[in-house]
Image: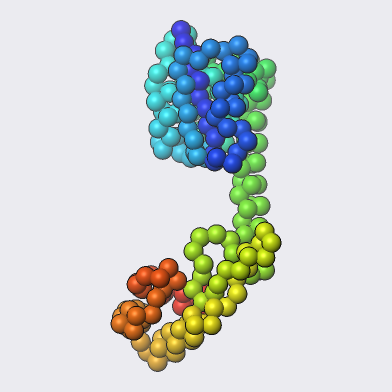
Amino acid sequence: MKNIIYLRNSDEKQELTCEVQLQEIINKGYSPDIVIEEKDVSGNTPITKRVGLVEGLDKIKKGDKFICYSLDRLSRDLMNYLFIEKEIKKNGGELVTIREENLMGDDPTSILMRQIVSVYASYELNLIKMRTKLALETKKIKGEKTGGHRPYGFQVKTDGDTKVLIPFPDEQKTLDEMKSWKKSGMTYKSIVEKLNNDKIPSATGGSWCMTSVYKIMKRAS
């Protein structure tokens, strides 16, 4: 019989790192025989894309303990969690979590409570996604940069901890010309060729392609 320790975090900034999870598990008296880490992996990621988890489940033999810090480290999706728990039991293993150790029984109440915890984890993840989306939309409305490449026609100005977009005169002139060319009947392909022939640099300083021109024109319209 062995202890299989499963650790997961979704990004490097998360305080609950794999190292912290492992230490908490050891502090509870579990000696790790096998340690599996999945770093920068979302709890909503499909099981088929979680190589470490699948390998861990395959290693389970009768009498083994599959130990994690909490249920949401396994998954933030109820259906995925139910599948994982079923696989552990099917292979003869026992699921152990440190944070919900009082809910790991096989009685109906414990099973129901584990499912409720998993549903709440899914709800919490969706709430985080919604708040992030709203925050990004608010930044866009205020003209703040939200990450990625700067949009063509603008420069990024740092104002304290905030990055603000301000018009870039040379590129704004090119944007006006692109609109004029399109209005005159030029195709996107022709616009790309003209920009490259005239050696007008893109936002990244390289050559133009139809995809970037199409997106810029749509955003500017």
Q: How many labels does the image show?
A: 0
Q: Residue at x 48, y 80 (%)?
A: 171
Q: Which of 157 and 2 is in front in this view?
A: 157
Asked where in the image residue 163 lies, by quadrant, the reply is bottom right
* 220 relative position to 211: left or right: right
Give the colour scheme shown. Answer: rainbow
* 28 relative position to 216: left or right: right
Q: Where residue 90 sits in the image (x, y, percent)? A: 44, 17
* 216 relative position to 69: left or right: left
Say above or below: 62 vs 135: above
Say above or below: 194 vs 61: below
Q: Nearer the viewer, residue 155 or 182?
A: 155
Q: Where residue 49 sits in the image (x, y, percent)? A: 41, 38
Q: Residue at x 69, y 61 (%)?
A: 160
Say above or below: 47 vs 87: below
Q: Which of 22 and 89 is in front in this view?
A: 22
Q: Which residue is drawn at 63% across and 14% down?
A: 28
